[in-house]
Amino acid sequence: MRVLLAEDDPQVAAGIMAGLRKAAFAVDWAKDGMEAESALQVEEYGLLVLDLGLPKMSGQELLTRLRDADNRLPILVVTARAGLDDRVQGLNSGADDYLVKPFDLEELIARVFALIRRFQGRANSELRIGALQVQPRTRTVMLRGKDVALSDREFRLLLALVEKPGAVLSIEQLEDRLYAWGEEIASNTIEVQLHRLRRKLGKEWVRNVRGVGFKIVDPD
């Protein structure tokens, strides 16, 4: 899943990005509110981590504008504004969760996963298709009760497919979900990872829809 981080403090941003990437998210970093708004207009994100004290356009203003436009993207506010009035205003303006700085990175990651579960209507973080079980939080995969060892890229690719069960995703759409701004993508990277993933799971699990893309299916 691709996440947008709107944070003007480089040190805080670096820590959050490192934690999210370790948890298998692709992360884009916007340094001010206007840059974040522009990114949201041209890219598809699964979640926004938003600081309220942004330059050029405040995070509060961006939050209000998004909700006024009926944008339902899950939003986790991360801010130094700890007052009760600030928290109430943020939540009433449409934030789905509110985390006060300084915070523990593990708590932020846990809240991100909780928001995604809530947004996707799931009781827990496990994703299941037939005999295939994928646990994003622990980055584990089981097929018919046996562990499947995947590389970081293979796991992220599988996660992108499992989050859209039955949907056919093109190579370009998969690249958008796996790679953030500035990450170099070799011309056949996705194809190579798909080949390896199909070899480990079995070709029947990852179907090639000729001329369109790939999808995850339950062969049973």
Image: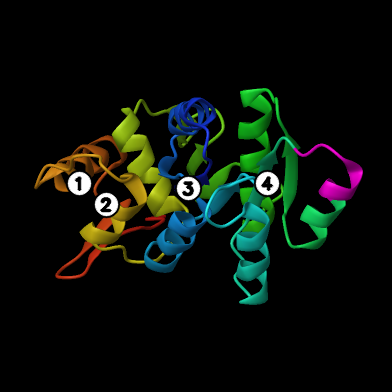
| Disc 2 element | helix
The tag on residue 190 is 1
Crowding near the residue tagged with mark 4, few <14, some 14–19, many ≥20 C-alpha atoms within 10 Å:
many
Distance between the alpha carbons at the discs numbered 1 and 3? 19 Å
Please state the extent of the stretch shown in magenta in the rendering.
81-87
The three-letter amino acid code for the residue at tag 3 is Val
Give whichever of 187, 181 is nearer the camera: 181
In magenta segment, residue 108: no
Between disc 2 and disc 4, whose residue precedes? 4
| Disc 3 element | strand
- Residue 60, image quadrant: bottom right
Distance between the alpha carbons at the discs numbered 2 and 4? 27 Å
Between disc 1 and disc 3, whose residue precedes? 3
Distance between the alpha carbons at the discs numbered 2 and 1? 7 Å
Give whichever of 49, 172 is nearer the camera: 49
Q: Nearer the viewer, mark 3 or mark 2?
A: 3
Please state, as top left, top right, bottom left or bottom right, where the C terminus lies in the image: bottom left
Residue 141 picture location, percent across and down: 45, 33
The three-letter amino acid code for the residue at tag 2 is Glu
**Residue that label 3 marks:** 3
**203 versus 156 height, above or below:** below
| In contact (CB < 8 Å): disc 2 and disc 1 | yes
Give whichever of 45, 168 is nearer the camera: 45
Q: Is residue 212 left or right of residue 97?
A: left
Between disc 1 and disc 4, whose residue precedes? 4
The tag on residue 175 is 2
Give whichever of 149, 112 is nearer the camera: 112
